[in-house]
Image (cartoon, rainbow, N blue to C red):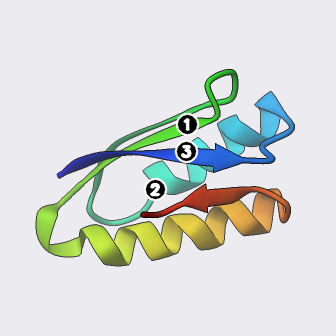
Amino acid sequence: MKKVFKLEDLECAHCAQKMEDGIRKLDGVQNVKVNFIMQKMTLEADDERFDEVLKEAVQICKKIEPDCRIIIK
């Protein structure tokens, strides 16, 4: 499954890269791209683990940049 999420308050391109690197290491992640300019994250992960991977990705983002939010609809 592949989904695109809007990010709010991502203030640093270096932090975006650190988020991407951390999320990429999660089990079940096939691909991830955090775009600082567009303020978006594209996450591709195993269908059966997608929600779990997304929760872990949110935690990684909060740890790296506490003010950044992933908008989940």
The residue sitting at 17% across, 60% down in the picture is 46
Secondary structure of the residue carrying tag 1 is strand
The alpha-carbon separation of the residues under discs 1 and 2 comes to 19 Å
Task: Give the amino acid at mark 3.
Answer: Lys
The answer to whether 12 appears left or right of 3 in the picture is: right
The alpha-carbon separation of the residues under discs 2 and 3 comes to 21 Å
**Res. 6 mark:** 3
> How packed is label 2: few (under 14 Cα within 10 Å), some, or many (20 or more)?
few
Q: Earlier in the sequence, mark 2 or mark 3?
A: 3
The residue sitting at 69% across, 21% down in the picture is 37
The residue sitting at 57% across, 43% down in the picture is 20
The answer to whether 17 appears left or right of 42 in the picture is: right
> How packed is label 1: few (under 14 Cα within 10 Å), some, or many (20 or more)?
some
Which residue is tagged 1?
Answer: 40
The alpha-carbon separation of the residues under discs 1 and 3 comes to 5 Å
Q: Residue furthest top?
A: 37
User: Contact (CB < 8 A) between labels 1 and 3?
Assistant: yes
- Which x, y percent locates residue 72? 47, 63
> How packed is label 3: few (under 14 Cα within 10 Å), some, or many (20 or more)?
some
Secondary structure of the residue carrying tag 2 is loop
Secondary structure of the residue carrying tag 3 is strand
